[in-house]
Every structure is written in C-alpha cells, then in structure tokens.
Amino acid sequence: MKARDVVTRGRRDSIAKDVARLAGVSVTTVSRVFSGKTDVIPKNTQDRVMATAAVLRYRPNFLAKALRQGKTQTIGLIVPDISDAYFYQIARGVEDVAQTAGYTVIFANTDRLPEKEQACVNLFFDKKVDGIIFAGGGVNDDNHLNDHAWEGMRVITIGPHRLPFSAILVDDGAVIAAATHHLAAVGCRRILCLAGKPNWLVTQRRLVGYRQAIADAELDDDPALIMFGGFSQGSGEEVTRAAIDRGIEFDGIVAFNDYAAIGAMQVLREEKRRIPDEVAIVGCDDTPLAALIHPTLTSIRFPQYEFGRAAAEMVLGQRPDNAEPLMFSYELIQRESTTRLG
Amino acid sequence: MKARDVVTRGRRDSIAKDVARLAGVSVTTVSRVFSGKTDVIPKNTQDRVMATAAVLRYRPNFLAKALRQGKTQTIGLIVPDISDAYFYQIARGVEDVAQTAGYTVIFANTDRLPEKEQACVNLFFDKKVDGIIFAGGGVNDDNHLNDHAWEGMRVITIGPHRLPFSAILVDDGAVIAAATHHLAAVGCRRILCLAGKPNWLVTQRRLVGYRQAIADAELDDDPALIMFGGFSQGSGEEVTRAAIDRGIEFDGIVAFNDYAAIGAMQVLREEKRRIPDEVAIVGCDDTPLAALIHPTLTSIRFPQYEFGRAAAEMVLGQRPDNAEPLMFSYELIQRESTTRLG
DNA sequence: TTGTATGCGTTATCAT
DNA sequence: ATGATAACGCATACAA
C-alpha cells in the first residue's frame, strides 16, 4: 500500500504546548517567539524554544491563529475564467505578491454569471479572506453584489464596477477610441464593432469611445455596425458571421477582446476576405495569441500582470488604496492585421 | 462583560449563540441544524432555527468549524506556472469540481523551483488543506519533497513523480514515440529533439520514447540531436538557434511542449527554412496556440481539463484513488507543420 | 522577563 | 429531542 497508510498510529502534529513543556517555558513564551514579539525575550530563551520546536517539527496552526486574530493571510481572487489570458496573467501577478508575503490565494471562476459571483463572494466571506480581488468588469444589474454586506471587507476591483471600492482601471473609452482612430488612419470607413454583452459595464464604457471616435473621424455612423456578443472565439465567429449574413458592409473591425477578434479572423478567412486589405482588424488585451496568429493581430496592450500585483499590494497594505481609482496606461501594438502596404 | 453580548456599535457577524438565544434553543441545536444532523430534530424546530438565522444573517464560521473538525474544505493546487496553457486548463478543471462541492482552491506557482515547491507544500500543510494536487512532473533530486512528512495528507500528482501517491499520468514514452514515428512517416530522418531540462522526470521518460522510435524506424541516431532546455518559447528559440549554430543538421523537430515548438518555429522563420518541407515539427500539449499559429502546429493533445477534474474528484473522495496510476490517453492532432504536400 | 487564565465559534460527548 | 460543557490551538490582558 501507500506510505501514508502505513503510519496510521496517532502521530498528530505537535503543538505549542508540547514545545513549551519540552523547552521548560509556557505556551505564551512559545507564542511570543513565533509571533516575532521577540523584543522582550532574551536571545537564549528564543534559541531554546526554536531548537525544541525544530526537534518536534512544530508548526503553528494557522486555523487557531486565524480564529483568534480574525485574519487568515488569504486573498480571494474572483475571475470570470482562469483560462482567459487576460485573467491568468492577473492571477500570476496576485499570487507572486501573495507568495512573497506568505499569503495564500484562493480563486474562483464565475463565467460572469451572477449566481456564481454571489456564491463566490459568500464563500470567500465565510472563509474569512483578508481581502477580495474582483477581476473583470461588472454588469448593469449588480444587485446580487450591492445587496451584500461588505463592511469590514477590503475589496479591490479590476475593471469597471459600480461597487464603492478601490478600483484598478484603464480609460476604456480612450482605449477603444484609440483603436478606432487607428483603423480610420489606415483608411477604414465602416468599422464593425464587436462589443461584449450589452449589460457589461466595460461594453458601455468602451462604446462611448467607439462612438466618439466615429464622430470625430467622421466615419459611417451606422447602429447596425455594433454587434453585441461574448468574449470567446466562438462568439466572435458567430457575431461576424451574423453581420455578413445580414449584408452589413464593413472594412474594419474593432473587437473589445482578442478572442473575439480571432473568431472574426477565422470567419473572414473562410469568406476569403483579405486581412488587412479588405478588412483591417484590431483586438484588445494583447494576449500571447495576437503575436502568433496569421496574420498577426494589432491589439491594445494592458499591463495585466501589474494589475494583479497592484491589487494584491493594495490588499496587503503595501500600496495605498485611495478613494480614486488607480489608472493604468495602455498601448496600441500595431501588427499585420492593420498594416496595409502601399 | 464580553463584547460578545453587548451590541457594540460595530455590527459584527452574528454567531450560533445569537441564533440560539433568539430561537429559544441551545447552540447545540443550531449546530445540529446547520450540520444537517437533522434526523433527530423536529421539523418545526428546524424551521424556527433557520428562520431566525436568516433574520440575523447568520453564517457558520468556517475557521471555528475547521479548527474543531480538522477539515478546511480546501484543496491546494501547486503548478509551475498558472500562465501556461497546460496548467490553467488543469486549474479550471480542479476549480469547477471544487466549486460545485462547496470547496475552495488555493493555488501557488513554483516555476519548478525546489525552494518554491517546498515552501508551497509547507504553507499548504500549515493551512491544513484537505488535499494537495501537485501538477507538473517532478525532478530527479526531489529530496526537498521526500523529506517531508506526508502522513495524513491526501496528495494527487499529475505527471511523473517519485512520490508514493496517487498519480494521474499519460504514457510519456508512447506519446513521444508516436510523435517521432509521425515525423518519420512524413519523411524525416534526422529529428531534433527539444527536451526539457535533463533532471526533469518527464524529460527522462519521454526521451526513452524518442530513442525507441529512432531505433524502431531506423533513423539517424545522433546524440547531438538531443537538446535540453526549458518549456518556454524563449528556451525553444535559444536551443534551436544553438543547434543551427553548431551546424547540426535536421529535417524534423519533436518538441516536448508547444511553447518550445513555437520558439523553434520562430527561429526557422528567421532562418528562412520552410515548414514543413524543409523541417517538419510537432509539439506537445495542443495549447490553443497550436491551431492558430502559422503554419498551424501538429501537436499531441492531452485532456488537461479532465486531469484537473479527476484529481479534484480524487481529493474529494468522489473517485477512487487507487494505488495504480490513473492513465489518460493522448491524441496526435495533425496540422500544417507536418503536412507535406506532394 | 515570564506565566495564568480566558476567549475565538464551532462540534462532540455525555447527560437528561 | 435537547442541553451543558469540554475541547480544537492559539493570542492576549493581566498578574507576578
């Protein structure tokens, strides 16, 4: 059988009391040594405690400590989908900071479903996390979150939300305005907009930028050019196909996310429409895919990893979390999908 | 008196005692109702308790319960890097199962560094996780893990390890043998092998398959064709570049990971060597990139998401974890990088 | 400088 | 069918 089945005899972990007895001190002293309240304890007492603790392989019980202190050294991370490049980079940033600080990260996927969001928040509260990082923009109807009793919980949102918490943001309107202007600059007049779902806040904010740019650049302002959908490749395909089927004409595409852009590229390829000459296209997030797909995809880059780091630092109190949002910048990375030769 | 009984201005969470008093029962009864030990409790008592609990917004304290029962409803997930497609798919599988069961997943990135691996394991033990899922193969010198006192901890490994625990595996030798034979079938004679680091167990197992296939297919058996490196795109580039600089000739590449394969493709492009006509190439993991890069990359597909689900189910006891490893199958997905026309 | 006693909120044991 | 009470392992106020 397996090694762990063999030693069934009751070898429980040793506890502070054991160390105390063997070292000839009280549990209080052990506690003090392990809590770093070492300023009042003589060096040799410390050493004796640590030595016997090592012998007994003593490790303080986090649960007991947490129950007593009301702090779990745990950060809760809520993402729509850890498989999405935008979010796994955030996750990596959060965990790097947490690990360095001796904290632990619990994460959960919501698929942007209100039921799951609510369930995750409840679970994280029940588990007494020290802070929650809510990644991914919110939705219009966010009563499932607004009804929650948030007091006492430190929350950081990444992306637009209507919750009264510290936020990490980019200027979503400006982002899409920049992308749209870029398409205009390479000669596009009718720009198909692959937006997210209509009730997503990020969709609403970005649409403002799209419309603004359309007006500024005096491009065709046709409501039919705005297509609502999800942030998956499949959704991008579906929506692009629908636009074509409806006979909507377009010579450029701005997608609010790279996966949707890639779906669109797939359909254009099937339809034998040349990129970028017949249709130029720009995505968002600058996922690793953007630089590898053919043709390579122009995209807006955000520092997702830094979002994650910053959020974790705010939770840990290593960085001030002010009332005003922490704004990050963006960068348009031009690639083949918008580079028209001659 | 105890701040507990006084309603200090701060709205603390309500606890079992509050519910008990208001419902006119004892905490024991409240506990029983919330623990589902409802068979001895009359329906109307149950209802009364649940009703007052709802009024007080009572939620049982996980920490106290965990301290008492020694179970945290938490799964620890250890991955080399959550940003790697192989691992974020596993992570998604683990979390889906966990979330459904009301469990929580804590994760940590190790970058395959022994120090980090050890630190994570220690931290997870300290946090009293109910089980650890160790994803990503182990290394030769794994004393940092073998020295650990594992008794009482349920551990599932995904990928080759030398730890005495339930394992989820594919036949690594067969995988690479299949890839190598595929290259042979399209006409390759000198196959460059982009292996991982020499001390990785997965590297060793897969090299057996490579050598076997080389022998079986009577291909050039040149030790110089075996290049050791990491599983990143950068490493793939570096190693391929080195092979070319050393004047090593090859007409095929088998990479033990897609990222390395993509790095190789990058270098081949710079060197103007046509894929697949001059060099055919096959990767491993069938990451989303494989189907999108140009030319599309032949790769071996594993059911990573199912690895994650299965591992979580084993930890939760929903699936038997036998002494013998749980073997999963693989599938070679042929794409342009090995499809020679004519 | 060190120790004693109590509480954190729950579950389990033993009564009734 | 229900309750009183003792753990779970630690941190802290208060003593000494």
Image: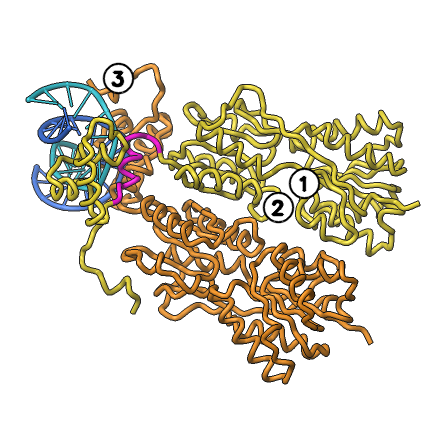
Chain colours: A yellow, B orange, C blue, D cyan
In magenta stretch: residue B13: no
Q: Which residue is mark 2?
A: A85
Judged from this view, the residue extending furthest toward the top is B9
Q: Nearer the viewer, mark 3 or mark 1?
A: 1
Q: Residue at x 44, y 68 (%)?
A: B326
Residue A20 quadrant: top left
Tag 3: residue type? Val
Nearer to the camera, B24 or A312: A312
Question: Predominant secondary structure in magenta?
Answer: helix
Q: Is residue A222 above or below residue B122?
A: above
Q: Secondary structure at mark 1?
A: loop
Can the viewer see residue B45 in this picture? no
Can the viewer see residue A312 in this picture? yes
Tag 1: residue type? Asp
- Tell me the quarter of the image containing the C terminus of chain A: top right
* Discs 2, 1 touching: Cβ within 8 Å: yes
Which residues lie in the magenta part? A59-71
Ranked by sequence position, the earlier of labels 2 and 1 is 2
Q: Which residue is mark 1?
A: A285
Q: Which residue is mark 3?
A: B6
Alpha carbon separation for disc pair 3 and 2: 49 Å
